[in-house]
Image: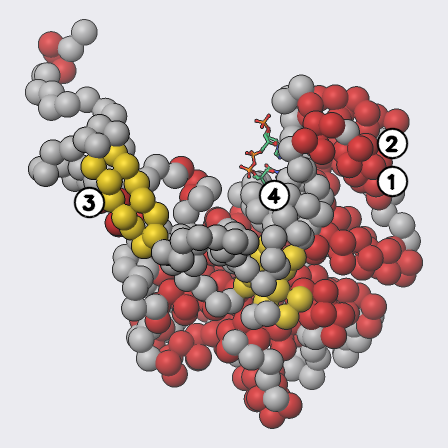
Amino acid sequence: MDSSLSATQTKKPEGSVTSRETLTITDNRTGKSYEVPITHGTIRAADLRQIKVDPKEFGMMSYDPAFNNTASCISKITFIDGDAGILRYRGYPIEDLAEKSTYLETAYLLLHGELPTSAQLENWTYNVTHHTYIHESIKKFLDGFHYDAHPMGMTISTIAALSTFYHDAKDIFSADSRTKQTYRLIGKMPTIAAFSYRHTLGMPYVYPDNDLSYPGNFLNMLFRTSETKYRPNPTLERALDILFILHADHEQNCSANTIRSVGSSHVDPYSATAAAIAALYGPLHGGANEEVLRMLMEIGSVEKVPNFIKRVKAGEVKLMGFGHRVYKNYDPRARIIKRVAYEVFELMGKNPLLEIALECERIALEDDYFVKRKLYPNVDFYTGLIYQSMGFPMTMFPVLFAIPRTSGWIAQWEEMLLDPEQKIARPRQIYLGHDTRHYVPIGQRG
Ligand code: ACO
């Protein structure tokens, strides 16, 4: 496939005789034919509505549970070619950004469409950095959580609670208001995440240090104890920044679709972002990195890997961190993450679970079951090992995903909001339930 074309765009076949960009559909129930336009290799589902047997009918719909083959929007943010293993933000290959950019610069790119000039980056960094503090009442709110509350649950609730502090956030069609909420969301996410973590440890909260970089300050808020000035290890600071870049956006996945869908009701961005974080929390999405570690611990040793793979093939368990709805090739992010993992292990010592992970990957990449289904390691397969080596408990893993994804979510939300074609999200259904029935009093029911 031409990598400059999206999954929904196709090239005209060589030597094609017809130049009509249309699709002719014949309804064999009536013998009638319909010609519908093709744009970007796509037909509009609404064009199917003219297909009816009886004029009183609603008209033809397409049935697509889980949106396997439905483009729900037109986007200019992120491009993925899952077959070729390509990921680009605003046209820039993920490999280039991971090597040369920083998370804050990448977030700017996602949100503004272009890489910033030096002045723009300075201004952007200043503004995000100066929105890292949270209202003291939010600390009290966090204190209300039980000591063993999952930090992801705390993050979801606290981000939703921000909407009660910033009433101007409701003004979603004001560009100034959106910019302000963007600074706040990107700035405060690490603070809320770090405070949630410290709360579970019963340790005092560490306030943001605005002299530090975005990932450096996050490490400061997580790990500082009695030192007057926390100095993040540069290898860990850069590793975290790269992981943040890799997780910043991934087009129309479950959580991006959530923020677009919830945001389409015109709710404020804090409530919409909380919904997106909740979508990410699930084990099939951002919760997978936590599940990968649990799985590697359950396997326990390299010798037990073949038996575990047998269980996967028998359908008893899933090989977590493998497979992807879009990538039918090695996830390009997983490749970069594997390299970062070795850099972190060099500093922190090799994670003992690494050998088990490598053996799972080795066997899976050679095994027919995985090859036939095109199951390759995804972004989550190695991230958990890095996070664990950096000192994060497993419950923090999905939170570490949510922090950088905030920029992608806001970019998706804003694009949806400003798209004149978008309306409140409202899918249709095929109703196969009962026809009218009459209420039966409880004493007369069998
Ligand atoms: N282990 C074993 N078999 C798998 C796995 C896996 N991890 N993933 C898919 N399969 C099998 C399915 O059982 C199915 O087999 P079948 O054809 O015999 O029924 C086939 O591969 C196709 O899988 P689907 O479930 O149709 O793929 P789908 O696109 O719906 O699911 C998903 C993608 C959810 C990511 C899936 O691969 C999975 O559950 N992986 C494990 C969880 C995970 O790592 N999630 C993180 C994804 S990345 C992210 O969200 C950031």
Q: Position of residue 160 (x, y in %)?
A: 42, 60
- Marks 2, 4: nearer the viewer: 4
Of mark 2 and mark 4, the one earlier in the sequence is 2
Q: Tell me the SS state at disc 4.
A: loop
**Disc 1, SS:** helix
Looking at the picture, which amino acid does disc 3 mark? Answer: Gln
Q: Earlier in the sequence, mark 4 or mark 3?
A: 3
| Beta carbon at label 4 within 8 Å of ligand 1 | yes
Q: Residues within 10 Å of mark 3 (few under 14, many from 20)?
A: some
On residue 302, the disc is: 2
Q: In this figure, which residue is indicated by the disc labeled 1?
A: 355
Mark sitting earlier along the chain (2/3): 3
Nearest the camera: 340 or 117?
Answer: 117
The residue that label 3 is drawn on is 50
Q: Could you tell whether 242 is left or right of 286 in the image?
A: right
Q: Secondary structure at mark 3?
A: helix
Of labels 1 and 4, the one closer to you: 4
**Cα separation between marks 1 and 4:** 23 Å
Residue at position x 85%, y 47% from top? 351
> Closer to the N terminus: mark 3 or mark 1?
3
* Tags 1 and 4 touching, CB below 8 Å: no
Q: Which residue is mark 4?
A: 324
Residue 420 relative to residue 213: left or right: left
What kind of residue is marked 2? Val
- Compare marks 1 and 4 and give the one earlier in the sequence: 4
The quarter of the picture where residue 201 lies is: bottom right
Image quarter for ligand 1: top right
Q: Given this view, does label 3 or label 1 mark the residue nearer the observer?
A: 3
Q: Position of residue 302 (x, y in %)?
A: 87, 31
Q: CA distance from mark 2 to mark 4?
A: 25 Å
